[in-house]
Image (cartoon, helix red, strand yellow):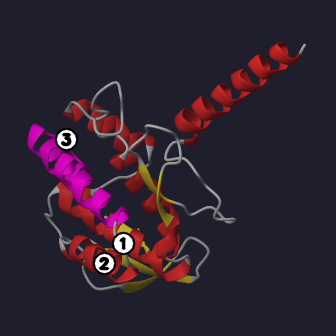
Amino acid sequence: MDIPLNDYPTGAAVATDLVNTSPTVRPDGDGLPTPEALAGFLAEHHVYPDAVAEREPTGEDLFGVQLLRREVRGILETETADQAVAGGHVLARRAALGPVLRRDGDDRWQWHVPTAPGAPLADELAALFGVSLLGVVRVLGHDRFRACDATGCRGVFADTSRAGRRRYCTPDRCGNRVNVANHRARQRAGSVAR
């Protein structure tokens, strides 16, 4: 797999989505219960690791990615930038090779970090997430690692939005739930006032 250094927001978004597939976060259970679900997750996020380029993910791959999910969560929950950077380095070292300079489709030079040939799926993803989370700390700051604001949610995320005002781990789920609850509260308050 080839990790572009300038596209850290994409890797951070995939890391966030992976962490939030955990049964710790999801009230309906594990979002990655099977190797097929893992294959769907990778395809949905347009992540194409070399480890599964010519085969489907296995139960061993799934187990490794489920363990990785915990490591990534630990980085998103760090208290300091130094802790986050140390965790990002640990993840990146699992499969990342030194950066290389390559031309992109527009003939511009871009930095990339390739992963080691033959690396397991979880290690390739660890490298992607480590490099991406290090990019978030460098460009946006450690304060962009946050817990979800939705009541009762245990989700965490890396806010790579331009304004840095993201509040929910999964805006479509948690954000909508909060908005619906607020709307209903306003309706109840309006009907009481009449």
| Discs 1, 3 touching: Cβ within 8 Å | no
Question: Residue at coordinates 23% horizontally, 60% vertically from top-left?
Answer: 71
Mark 2 burial class by Cα count in 10 Å: few <14, some 14-19, many 20+: some
Q: Could you tell me the amino acid type at mark 3? A: Pro
Query: Dot 3: what SS?
Result: loop
Which amino acid type corresponds to the residue marked 2 in the rendered image? Gln
Element carrying mark 1? loop
Magenta span has 67? yes
| Quadrant for the N terminus in the image | bottom left
- SS assignment for the magenta stretch, majority: helix
Placement of 25 over or under 2, stated as above or below: above
State left or right for residue 96 relative to residue 102. Answer: left
Residue type at the position of mark 1: Glu
Q: Write down the region rendered in magenta.
A: 51-77
Look at the numbered discs 1 and 2 and tell me whether their residues touch, using CB distance below 8 Å: yes
- Per the image, the residue denoted by label 1 is 79
Residue position for label 3: 57
